[in-house]
Every structure is written in structure tokens, then in C-alpha cells.
Amino acid sequence: MNADLHYFNRYEFKYWVDPYVRDRLIEYLLNFMSFDKNNIDGKPYDICSLYLDTKNLSCYYEKYDGDVFRRKYRIRFYNGNVSRLSFEIKEKHNLYIKKKREIAQIDQENPTEIPISLLNGEANLKGPFVHAYLSLNLEPTTWVAYQRVALVGRNNPGLRVTFDDGLSGCKPNGFEFRTKNLQPVTLSRWHQKTILEIKFNNYLPFWLEQCLKDLNLSHQSISKYGMNINRFFFYHHRERQWTL
């Protein structure tokens, strides 16, 4: 198993948008941006992540308590390719994001679960994710999946705009891949909006800033992980604000 470590630092804004706004916005953005290489012919690609947390859900409560500094831990793969895994730590300080990603290739045909050897230090994966897993006693908490359309700035590759739809998830069974058990996750049966995320390094381009003003969009606190925890851990609507 081989592993590569990558670091990303940038700002991140999130918004709720209606489907018709999403389509108009993508059409406008294509004047300045191009589809991500994973969006073949502009079609969405699949993202699936296993989120890990402490036994008392400290990462979840950091979000809901509004902590200025918070972390999330996840193991992610794309388009159903479970042989190539991204082990990620996402740190957030207000609107500034730091991401540490270590990619591991599994030398196994059709694996049914994430090899525990990747997490206990036996394999080549020896970066910050493994250290956090061992020191914090992290454990699988929920699967989170969705479809993404992503655009990248033609002259500014640090600018990335994504549209996420079809949020789903399920409770984990250890490190077993559970993509066949995914269930829809929404705020309500009437709330079917798209999650828009804008990520940039230093500044928001003027043309994009004006576009957001024209659409009367204001960034909000949106957590796909939080929504999944509410869906699969809290069953009464009064327990958490985003519970179904």
C-alpha cells in the first residue's frame, strides 16, 4: 500500500440554493470557470466518506456549540473506487480551512472493508490521520454520500465552486463499506436544496462577489456530517435543529 500526503489551506463559504438557481449559476460560472476533470460532460461524480469521531461525538458538538476551532476526520473515496482512499483531517478556524489529506492505494481486489492495517501503523500510512486515530480513540460514526458538480477557475486554479445534491448516509458497521445501505438525508420533505460551496485562497473575485449579491445569497453554517448525525442518532425533532 502506497500513501501520498497533501496539504490545502483556503477559505470556504457555504450556501443553500434552489435547483433552478443552481442551473443558472453554473451556466454563468462557465464564462470564467471549467468543469472539474471528474465531471465528464458536466455530469456529477459520486463522493462517499466514512466519518470518524470520539465516543462522545466531540467533533459533532464542536460544530453545534459554535467553537471557533474545530476538526473533522473522514475516509473518502470517489465514484465507487474503494481501492483508492483519502484519509483527511479538516480543520476550520472561522471561515479558514486547513485540510491534511493522505491518499492510500489498497493492493487488494474488491475490498469489502477499510483495512485496519492502514490505521494501526502497520502500513505506509503514517501521517496525522493515523496519529489522531490512535491518540483520540476515533471510531466510525456515519457514512456520508452525495453527488457533486465542481468548477475550477480557468485563470485562478485556487478558486473552486461545488454544487452537492442527493445527500445520503447510514450508520456504519465498523470499517465495512456500506454504500448499498445509504438512505436519503434532508432537512424536511420540502427542503430539497443544493449545497453550494465556494473555496478560494486569498480573495473572492469581484465578478463572483457581485453574482452572490445579485442572487441575494448569504453564507451559512452547513454541515453534511452534522445533518447525518442528526438523521441517524437523534430521532426527536426537538433534540437538534437539523433533525428530520
Image: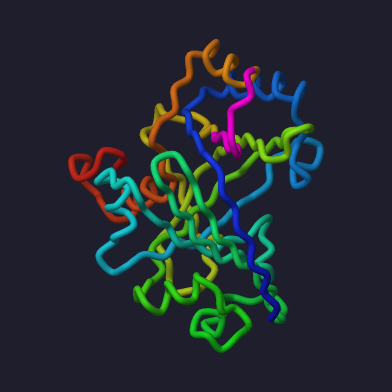
Q: Position of residue 90 (x, y in %)?
A: 48, 55
Q: The magenta stretch spans which residues? A: 197-206
Q: Check the image and report above or below for 183 versus 33.
A: below
Give the camera-side residue of 62 and 205.
205
Q: Position of residue 25 (x, y in %)?
A: 64, 21
Q: Residue 7 sits in which quadrant?
A: bottom right
Direction bottom: furthest residue: 122
Tell me how the rendering is colored: rainbow
Residue pictured at 72% horizontal, 81% vertical: 107
Q: Position of residue 143 (x, y in %)?
A: 47, 59
Count of numbered tags: 0
Direction top: furthest residue: 214
Quarter of the picture containing the C terminus is top left
Residue pictured at 51% horizontal, 25% vertical: 17
Direction front: furthest residue: 202
Residue 20 is left or right of residue 1, and the answer is left
Q: Check the image and report above or below for 198 versus 128.
A: above
Residue pictured at 45% horizontal, 62% vertical: 73
Asked if residue 1 is among those painted magenta in the image, a careful observer would answer no
Residue pictured at 69% horizontal, 81% vertical: 1
Give the camera-side residue of 75 and 6.
6
Give the camera-side residue of 96 and 225.
96
Direction right: furthest residue: 41
Asked if residue 198 is among those painted magenta in the image, a careful observer would answer yes
Q: Position of residue 11 (x, y in %)?
A: 52, 39
Q: Residue 165 sits in which quadrant?
A: top right
Q: Check the image and report above or below for 21 versus 61.
A: above
